[in-house]
Image (cartoon, rainbow, N blue to C red):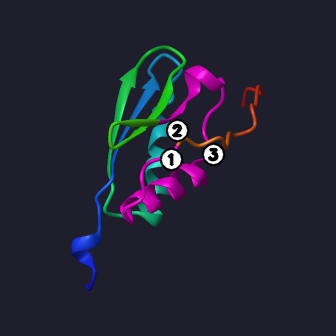
Amino acid sequence: MSGEELHHNPKVDIEYCKVCDYGGHCLNLAKTIKNSSPEATITCNKGRQGSFEVVVNDKLIYSKLQTMALPDYEEVADVIHQVSNGAEPREIKGQQPVNCSIS
């Protein structure tokens, strides 16, 4: 594949709230990221209560502790795709609508 030497492999660390049972959210986000950036390395880590923190190459790009909402997965995947093409990680603003219904 040409241009392979220009490809960066983004390292994505996601800290999620263990007691909130956000493991599934982490896996869904990982799947969304892998769709656009298969070369990304993604780690889901159980962490602080209420957390869903997304760190790309050691830079925090999204914090549920600050926003109280889960991130927009597509926007996260977008940033990571840009990083894999050499861009710097940037903070994202997109959030999922807060859904309080219990299914």
Does 101 lie within the magenta span?
Answer: no
Disc 2 marks a residue whose amino acid type is: His
Q: Residue at x 68, y 39 (%)?
A: 95
The residue that disc 2 covers is 25
Q: Residue at x 44, y 44 (%)?
A: 27
Looking at the image, how many numbered discs can be counted on the residues?
3
Q: Secondary structure at mark 1?
A: helix
**Relative to 102, does residue 33 appear above or below in the rendering?**
below
Asked whether, in this view, residue 34 is left or right of residue 69, the answer is left
User: Looking at the figure, which quarter contains the N terminus?
Assistant: bottom left
Residue 57 coordinates in the image, percent (x, y): 33, 43
Residue 45 coordinates in the image, percent (x, y): 34, 29
Residue 89 coordinates in the image, percent (x, y): 44, 48
Disc 1 marks a residue whose amino acid type is: Asn
Image mark for residue 72: 3
Disc 3 marks a residue whose amino acid type is: Asp
